[in-house]
Image: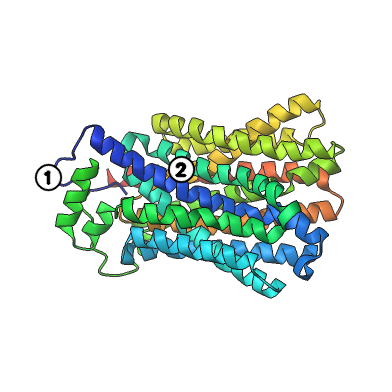
Amino acid sequence: MSSSATSPLAPATGTATRRSRTAVIALCWGLVLLDGIDTFIYGSVLPKMLGGHSLGLTPDVAGTIGSYANFGMLLGTILSGMASNWIGRRVTVFVSVVIFTFATLGTGWSQSSGQFGLFRFVCGFGLGALLPIAISYGMEFTSRGRRALATGIIMTAHQTGGALAPLIALWLVDEHGWRTAFIVSALPALILLPVAFKLLPESPTNLLTRGRRADAELLAAAYGTELAEPKTHHVDKLDALKNLFRHGQWSTTLCFWLTSFAGLLLVYGVGQWLPKIMVELGYDTGDSLLFSTFLNVGGICGMLVAGRTADRIGPRKVVIAWFLLTAVFVYLMGVHMSVGVLYAVVFLAGLLLFSGQTMVYATVGTHHNDEDRPTALGWVSGMGRFGAIFGPWIGGALIEAGNADIGFTMYACAALFGALMMALAALTIRTRSAARH
């Protein structure tokens, strides 16, 4: 589903437009950083909360509250793309940040586990709503040959947030309590949001789709972006969603969703249970915690490597290759070897695992035209959230049953499944293309 012909108004070029586009990417990066911190802060303070029996939390209740946030993310990602087509992407970004910021503050002020769970659900909704729109911004305000790299750069912010959240907890929780960690995590948004409100533009494509051609052309010229003529002005409010299934597109959409399911199963399953599985396999507790750090550092590096590679050879090929290699290195994580070698294996697994899932988003974003992209990204991320729920569950079930030794084998199988689904997606695309010719 390629974009249609560009506007006769030629895009502006030069240093000013490049700086303007870079500013958009930087703002999206900063907002996704806040998303990452607020996503991971719960897991970072949870040991302290459980140890002090805060709000009467037990491991079972804590696990249930964690699933609330994931269900909130599922709803947020699914609805945000469609909402952005109706009310504008800029407004959708601001609303999502406001929602998760104040929900995080509410989490820190909660007086019962019920209130805590409700605020985590609302927080998840806002967190999930932001990500697909931020990726859409990055792809629209980047030249066509660098869109996968832009996606990778923006997603490094999420991994950076995941690395910062434990440091915030380490800095604050012991002396000031777990509530302070949530409140401090929310405060940067109160500073960044006014800046983003002033500097973040509306999507030119969204303006054109909503009939505001003059505004769209002026904005596209100012930022030096291509302005594609929309295929529809979305008289039907669900038109972007229906386009995911029209003209045989349903098979590709389903394969994309299943690939995302496998990817997020890996991201959340391995990410949550890596330290515990390593302890169960006999490694020192300190090493087991550091393995998580190496996994996330590898993830940050992998975003840049995968993005540049995908822009050269295509994101579908990168997803298939990355998921196959992820299966190898995740399986090796369960093989007994020297600790030094294992650190290298974990780093490489992180490099491949997180960026493989990110390139799923890049694949979907480049496959769909500009006006359908936010909805497509929202739904592929939303369907993947079922994997984010199932991945931690299967790890916990295996550990509870005394089968931690096969945990990494199960996750390796999920990576193989993801590679297969993306290969099938590529086949459906080629088949439809051949039929048209």
Which of the two residues, 42 or 353, is positioned nearer the viewer here? 42
Asked if residue 431 shows in the view, the reply is no
Asked if residue 416 shows in the view, the reply is yes
Q: Quadrant of residue 221?
A: top left
- Residue density around tag 2, few if under 14, some if 14–19, many if 20 or more, within 10 Å: many
Which of the two residues, 240 or 106, is positioned nearer the viewer here? 106
For the point 21% across and 47% down, the residue is 220
The kind of residue on which mark 2 rests is Ile
Quick check: 233 above or below 297?
Answer: below
Horizontal arrangement in the rendering, residue 210 relative to residue 179 (left or right): left
Sequence-wise first label, 2 or 1: 1
Residue 394, horizontal then vertical, whole percent: 73, 54
For the point 42% across and 51% down, the residue is 134
Distance of label 2 from label 1 (alpha carbons)? 30 Å
For the point 14% across and 56% down, the residue is 214
Q: Look at discs 2 and 1 and give the one toward the viewer.
A: 2
Secondary structure type for disc 1: loop
The kind of residue on which mark 1 rests is Pro
Residue 8 numbered mark, or none: 1
Secondary structure type for disc 2: helix
Disc 2 + disc 1, Cβ < 8 Å: no
* Type of colouring: rainbow
For the point 21% across and 44% down, the residue is 222
Give the labeled residue for mark 2: 154
